[in-house]
Amino acid sequence: MSSLPTDDAPPDRAAPASSGLVLVSTPIGNLGDISGRAVASLRAADLVLCEDTRTTARLLSAHAISARTAALHEHNEDARIAEVLAMLRAGRVVALVSDAGTPLVSDPGYRLVRAAIAAGLPVTGVPGANAALLALTLSGLPPQPFLFLGFSPPRRAARLAAYAPVRAAERAGLAATLIWYEAPHRLAEMLADLLQAFGDRPAAVARELTKRFEEVHRDGLAALAAHYATHAARGEVCVLLGPAPAEAAAEADVDALLRAALAGHRLKEAVAQVTAATGLPRKQVYARALALAGEENKKDVLF
């Protein structure tokens, strides 16, 4: 949207909601990055639902906000829904915040929002900080289209399996900047798996955004993987990968993945690994692996 903002919003939209569920975006690091509407909405709330009440308490204290808080996280969200819906039906205002950034973006709250919508209760929001979008604008990578994929699975096999359908979509024509969140202690492993699954292409690692030690490291994916293999990262991390090249993946790409996998694994394991990484049919990968293994055997005989 390119139109300039105006100050002629209707009074019922400019002022805090008088009832309903309000999704309030909070700072991702710098406590100053909160809007006047967000502060007003939190002050007007009968209840503020938060991932961690201790984290939100620091934000509320910094802005002199006195509000009743309660935890809403992955493990208790379903149990909270009936209570919150009852409050909304009684005309109360319930604000929902995450520890940092925009609620529901890799954070709890989706099930509550869906339940409120299904019940015909008002749901509104106060926009604000979002780490993925800020990282995208700072990355130097194409800003649109982009695909936000949340956190990668913590284990390697699951990560590669999660990347496979994205690679398949790229082979079918998807050309978008890809964005993930990642924990700092898993960053090196994740980058290595991204390199195996997607190949080397422009990428960026953004961490500690809006904080004192903010850093955006822009380079090829191979260079980033090599760097973070020996340099531990700290703080919240966003990983961005540039769009796939226009051409479809060449057979040579599969061969390179198979050779790397065969160097350290048995044929069956190598085939499973490359199948997960590429999204190609297992029979096709297996046939190519047999062909490569045959070529290597011939070399051994000749030399």
Image (cartoon, rainbow, N blue to C red):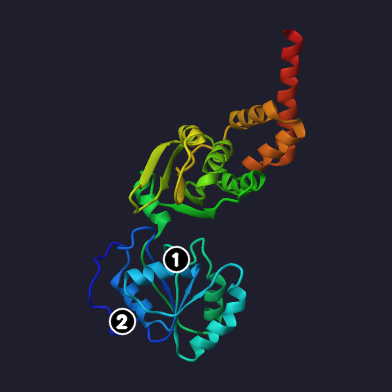
> Residue 140 versus residue 42: which sits nearer the camera?
42
- Three-letter amino acid code at disc 1? Thr
Q: Is residue 163 visible?
A: yes
Q: Between disc 2 and disc 1, whose residue precedes?
A: 2
Q: Is 118 left, or right, of 17 in this rendering? A: right
Residue 12's place in the image compared with 297, above or below, is: below
Left or right of residue 275: residue 14: left
Relative depth, front residue between 179 and 83: 83
Front one among 213 and 136: 213
**Residue 44: x percent and y percent?**
36, 82
Residue behind mark 1: 55
Give the image quarter of residue 205. top left
Pinpoint residue 78: horizontal percent, then vertical percent. Answer: 61, 75
Q: Is residue 40 left or right of residue 298?
A: left
What residue is disc 2 on?
A: 15
Q: Given contact means CB atoms under 8 Å apart, are the residues at marks 2 and 1 in contact?
A: no
Task: Specify the quadrant of the image occupied by residue 195.
Answer: top right
Residue 177 seen in the current view: no
Left or right: 255 as drawn, with respect to 100: right
Q: Amino acid at mark 2?
A: Ala
